Amino acid sequence: MENYRILIVDDLADNLKAMVSIFMKYEPDYHTLQTNNAHKALEIATQKLPDLIICDWDMPELNGIDFINLLKNKEVTKDIPVIMATGVMLNTDHLKIALDAGAVDYVRKPIEPVELIARTKAALLITSYYKQLLNNQKEELTANTLSLVKSQRIFSEFSKKVEDTIPLIKENPAKAEQELLAINRQLKNTNEKELWKKFNLSFSKVHNNFVANLTNAYPQLTPSDIKLCSFIMLGMANKEIASLMNSSSNSVKVSRYRIRKKMGLEKGTNLQNYLARF
């Protein structure tokens, strides 16, 4: 159970007490913060960054809608989800106003414990998924940036090698040809490794246990076998796999046959469906 922080904002002390009591009874691991002033709530939200805010709609000085607008205008608090609590604004038009302002849900007063807990959990679950998505995007951006830097370095290295070989074209054509062929082979191998790294990074985010599970079940599989299994599991055709692995379609067919033998699969067993189990 995560120790979520819930900020409760309501100008009536009885409402604050009631909601805090509900969380203490049903979700004691949640840490509740409370205030009867919306301006103070903005300060708390900025300093404490709660996982969720439950805010009263009808408050003096600053109502719930205005509070959400101020919250969304600050970079540090704009992504904190807000549940609107109301005892009078209950029709669909009112709900639309709250959602348009940025609220993720609403809860009716007088507060029903089951409804409060259910809506709170739903909002926290959505927020958790959203945070994970943002983290994945940041990780992907970082990986892509590092990849660009590395690609630039590799390009510079190969460019220098080609420049150094140019004088040999007239002086020693045979040697120049050997040098260029060697550079070409090295470039292909480097490109294949970089493509596999990028693919493996994305693949592992979706199928994070696939390689470990497959390796544990069949330790006799080589790294090349594992790579091929990853492509097969995604339903890629032999021609597509051959392009990625810098080989021929026939070579991929042979490799698939060898993998089936290593796994002891019976004839007719669909390899893609079998691999999907891992």
Image (cartoon, helix red, strand yellow):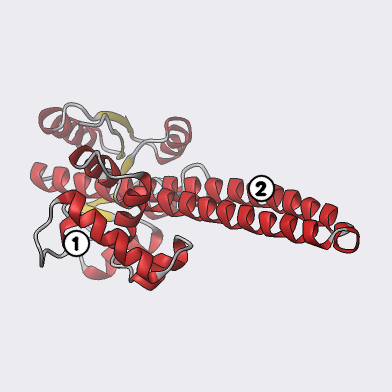
Q: Residue at x 69, y 55 (%)?
A: 183
Coordinates of residue 208 in the picture (x, y in percent):
30, 45
- Judge depth for marks 2 and 1 and give the one in front: 1
Q: Residue at x 13, y 52 (%)?
A: 264
Coordinates of residue 237 in the picture (x, y in percent):
33, 71
Q: Is residue 203 left or right of residue 259?
A: right
Position of 251 relative to 9 (above/below) = below
Q: CA distance from mark 2 to mark 1?
A: 38 Å
Q: Which residue is mark 1?
A: 271
Position of 68 relative to 113 (above/below) = below
Could you tell me if residue 205 is visible in this image? Answer: no
Q: Is residue 235 left or right of residue 20?
A: right
Q: Which residue is mark 2?
A: 149
> Which quadrant of the structure image shows residue 116?
top left
Could you tell me if residue 34 is visible in this image? Answer: yes
Position of 251 relative to 87 (above/below) = below
Coordinates of residue 54 in the picture (x, y in percent):
29, 43
The tag earlier along the polypeptide, 2 or 1, is 2
Position of 105 relative to 8 (above/below) = below
Question: Which numbered disc covers residue 253?
Answer: none
Q: Residue at x 38, y 57 (%)?
A: 102
**At numbered mark 2, what does the secondary structure look like: helix, strand or loop?**
helix
CA neighbours of label 2 inside 10 A, class few (<14), some (14 to 19), many (20+): few
Q: Amino acid at mark 1?
A: Leu
Q: Residue at x 21, y 67 (%)?
A: 91
Q: In terms of depth relative to the viewer, which is nearer, 83 or 28?
A: 28
Q: Amino acid at mark 2?
A: Val
Coordinates of residue 229 in the picture (x, y in percent):
29, 55
Q: In terms of depth relative to the viewer, which is nearer, 182 or 35?
A: 182
